[in-house]
Image (spheres, rainbow, N blue to C red):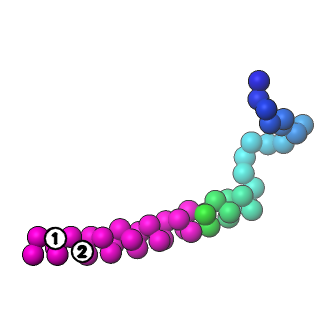
Amino acid sequence: MSSVPEAAGSSSTWGPAQWLGAVLAWIWVGVPFAYGLYELVLKIPALFG
């Protein structure tokens, strides 16, 4: 049994505000991660040089 009750008539699809929040959250996490990965790749040649 689910511990979170579902409201009657609620749909399981996301609204525009939820999509915007999800996209902003992925950008908030993805951009710094990609930058850190980029910086890490730049430092790899120094390990062998």
38 falls in the magenta region:
yes
Q: Position of residue 49 (x, y in %)?
A: 9, 75
Residue identified by numbered label 1: 47
Q: Amino acid at mark 2?
A: Lys
Find numbered disc 2 in the image and state the secondary structure of the residue it sits on.
helix
In the image, taking residue 37 as reference, residue 3 lies left or right, namely right
Name the residue located 56 percent from the left edge and 62 percent from the top edge: 26
Against 45, residue 7 (above or below) is above
State how far apart marks 1 and 2 are (Cα).
7 Å
Q: Which residue occupies the extreme top position in the image?
A: 1
Find numbered disc 1 in the image and state the secondary structure of the residue it sits on.
helix
Q: Position of residue 30 (x, y in %)?
A: 49, 65
- Magenta segment boundaries in residue numbering: 26-49
Q: Are marks 1 and 2 in contact (CB under 8 Å)?
A: yes
Q: Which residue occupies the extreme right position in the image?
A: 8
Q: Quadrant of residue 47?
A: bottom left
Q: Main secondary structure of the magenta part?
A: helix
Residue identified by numbered label 2: 43
Quadrant where the image shows the N terminus: top right
14 falls in the magenta region:
no
